[in-house]
Image: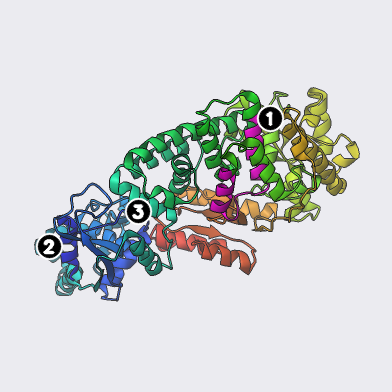
């Protein structure tokens, strides 16, 4: 089928996108690469469509389907959306993404290459052709460009050659693409989704939540938009949630189960009501967790799959809980997060926890008992704070006890309680023993970034302390604000403040931190502490690879970040924590990364990895990052592929 015919079918509603398809995710490099392949008549792959009755077809967007049968794109969405966007100069009706990815494509008549519009480079160069303008005007546009070039002596001799190239460019819409059809009454939504996942095995597969949402949208077309709207509200508050995560809470409220299959036979009215109740009790859970525990933004919001269980419990009790019950529920949430209750088989454990709430003997006590039987004793030991990096599981725990207790800022002496501080982004992580000094004394990055070397201070205080050693600045703090050091669980033996005794300092502080966590857990239990007793399960240390290893390396990366910003591009994230997308378990730290591209959502994810092992580079590559192992290569990439200049 010719590309022009496919585009006409999209316009007329004979071809559309199934509801379960994800949105448009291509970047500019992929779009220009596609047009380069089409121009050169290289194979770009065929399309796979699901032929079904338009009356029962569940499709994306608000465009009307043509009567009779309709072809829903199973494979080829990104390609056809890109072609449609460039050729038509607008997004198709089913579009959900960033339209700038295909806006402003240009073609150079002499070099026969595609690039996106750069004003300084292209504005006064008639050899850069606006592809969309040419496609929309057709042969008339070709004539216009030829006339313009013919009037310029320097191009007149090449006009015939340029006409051939413009004609070849226009001929892209006449290219035939093979269209394979999935048809038949036996092709149910479940079967088609399975086919889709197999065809797209190299990309991101559809989750069970995607399938459930597709079926919900069949009866309630606005469901996805309503859910995305609410996720946007939480995003503004500093929490990053997914549709799957929100739908899980809807599921627990409507069905009392974790598995999405139980939603399939629920009516649109039941889903709508369930969503509003889920939002109400998610908000209540977030307020409880932020207000009582101080865990008030995404980086420290661990154990997020405990929330659907909390939502179910709150819904069962219509949100009416007394102080003791509230704290017991929060005790369960913290314990589930600390021990990674939902880092494995999420659905299975949510189902077990939901079952513990049901029946005459069900409730919070049974829920906590089940957690203790699964994990062992729930008391924290010093060894649990031997982890390192901001991504360690006990990093949120350190944050939590700072916000719950009497911790004081070392510059002002003011308490850091949640009720007094508001959002945590007003604070910074402080290395008690400064990184520069530790690296100078040959400590490795694991020791330098040990959790027991972290505390939280205001930004102003952090800057004032600078890179001084504890033996220098600790006496000043204690003199100005007596008790401020102890409030942050600093061992008061002054010998431990010397850098040569740093390992002993860590060991002593780990003990103090564990004691504080247990004290706060006892506080949440209001004296009923029997759940904390019993054998304590030893936790294997999390193996996290990568990360900045020296002050010199950090300085190099900071300068590179400044250089990128000077070019009008987004700053990257230093020490970017990469976690497994399925389990949320941290896998590696990338030195400097742009997870959404240096042109956000328009270019590919990239990472600069200096002096890292092959394992880190491989992990980053498998995660979809384009990796650079030296600064010069990265700068050349920015110059040639992002800014489209010849030199950095």
Left or right of 121: which side holds 412?
A: right
Q: Which mark is residue 138?
A: 2
Which segment is the magenta one? 327-355
Q: Residue at x 49, y 62 (%)?
A: 624
Q: Earlier in the sequence, mark 3 or mark 2?
A: 3
Q: CA distance from mark 3 to mark 2?
A: 30 Å
Quadrant position of residue 44: bottom left
Q: Give the overall secondary structure of the magenta segment.
A: helix
Residue 514, percent across and down?
A: 78, 40
Residue 425, percent across and down?
A: 58, 35
Vertical placement of 353 versus 463: above or below? Answer: below
Instruction: Tell me if mark 2 has few (under 14), some (14-19) or many (20+) residues whose alpha carbon lies within 10 angstroms of its own.
Output: some
Q: Is 350 colored magenta in this rendering?
A: yes
Disc 3 marks which residue? 23
Element carrying mark 2: loop
Q: Earlier in the sequence, mark 1 or mark 2?
A: 2
């Amino acid at each position: 089928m010719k590309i022009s015919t496919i585009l006409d079918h999209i316009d007329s509603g004979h071809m559309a996108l199934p509801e379960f398809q994800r949105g448009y995710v291509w970047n500019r490099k992929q779009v220009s690469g596609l047009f380069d392949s089409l121009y050169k008549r290289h194979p770009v792959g065929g399309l796979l469509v699901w032929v079904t009755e338009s009356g029962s077809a569940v499709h994306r967007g608000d465009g009307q389907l043509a009567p009779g049968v309709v072809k829903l794109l199973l494979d080829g969405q990104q390609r056809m959306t890109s072609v449609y966007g460039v050729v038509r100069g607008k997004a198709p009706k089913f579009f959900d993404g960033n339209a700038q990815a295909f806006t402003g494509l240009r073609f150079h008549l002499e070099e026969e290459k595609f690039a996106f519009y750069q004003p300084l480079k292209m504005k006064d160069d008639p050899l850069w052709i606006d592809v969309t303008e040419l496609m929309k005007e057709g042969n008339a546009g070709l004539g216009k460009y030829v006339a313009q070039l013919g009037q310029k002596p320097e191009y007149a001799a090449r006009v015939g050659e340029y006409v051939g190239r413009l004609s070849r460019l226009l001929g892209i819409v006449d290219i035939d693409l093979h269209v394979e059809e999935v048809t038949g009454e036996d092709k149910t939504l479940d079967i088609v989704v399975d086919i889709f996942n197999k065809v797209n095995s190299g990309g991101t597969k559809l989750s069970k939540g995607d399938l459930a949402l597709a079926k919900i949208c069949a009866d309630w077309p606005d469901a996805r938009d309503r859910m995305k709207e609410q996720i946007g509200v939480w995003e503004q508050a500093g929490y990053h949630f997914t549709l799957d995560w929100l739908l899980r809470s809807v599921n627990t409220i409507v069905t009392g189960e974790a598995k999405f299959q139980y939603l399939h036979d629920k009516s649109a009215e039941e889903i709508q009501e369930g969503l509003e109740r889920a939002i109400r009790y998610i908000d209540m859970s977030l307020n409880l967790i932020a207000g009582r525990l101080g865990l008030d933004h995404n980086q420290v919001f661990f154990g997020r799959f405990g929330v659907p269980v909390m939502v179910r419990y709150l819904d069962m009790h219509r949100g009416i809980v007394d102080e003791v019950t509230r704290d017991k529920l929060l005790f369960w949430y913290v314990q589930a997060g600390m021990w990674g209750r939902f880092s494995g088989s999420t659905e299975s454990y949510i189902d077990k926890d939901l079952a513990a709430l049901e029946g005459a003997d069900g409730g919070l006590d049974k829920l906590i008992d089940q957690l203790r039987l699964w994990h062992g004793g729930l008391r924290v030991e010093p060894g649990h704070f031997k982890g390192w990096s901001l991504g360690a599981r006990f990093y949120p725990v350190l944050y939590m006890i700072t916000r719950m207790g009497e911790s004081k800022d070392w510059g002002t002496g003011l308490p850091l309680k949640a009720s007094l501080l508001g959002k945590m982004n007003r604070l910074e992580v402080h290395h008690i023993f400064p990184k520069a000094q530790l690296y100078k004394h040959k400590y490795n990055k694991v020791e330098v970034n040990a959790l027991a070397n972290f505390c939280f201070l205001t930004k102003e205080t952090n800057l004032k302390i600078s890179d001084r050693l504890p033996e220098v600045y600790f006496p000043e703090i204690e003199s100005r604000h007596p008790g401020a050091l102890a409030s942050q669980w600093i061992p008061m033996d002054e010998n431990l403040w010397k850098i040569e005794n740093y390992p002993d300092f860590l060991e002593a502080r780990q003990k103090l931190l564990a004691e504080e966590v247990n004290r706060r857990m006892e506080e949440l239990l209001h004296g009923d502490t029997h759940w904390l007793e019993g054998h304590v399960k030893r936790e294997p240390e999390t193996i996290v690879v990568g990360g900045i290893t020296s002050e010199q390396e950090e300085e190099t990366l900071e300068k590179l970040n400044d250089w990128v910003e000077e070019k009008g591009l987004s700053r990257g994230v230093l020490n970017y924590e990469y976690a497994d997308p399925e389990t949320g378990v941290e896998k590696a730290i990338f030195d400097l990364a742009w997870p959404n591209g240096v042109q956000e959502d328009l270019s590919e994810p990239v990472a600069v990895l200096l002096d890292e092992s092959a394992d880190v580079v491989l992990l980053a590559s498998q995660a979809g990052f384009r990796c650079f192992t030296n600064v010069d290569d990265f700068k050349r990439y920015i110059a040639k592929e992002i800014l489209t200049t010849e030199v950095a």
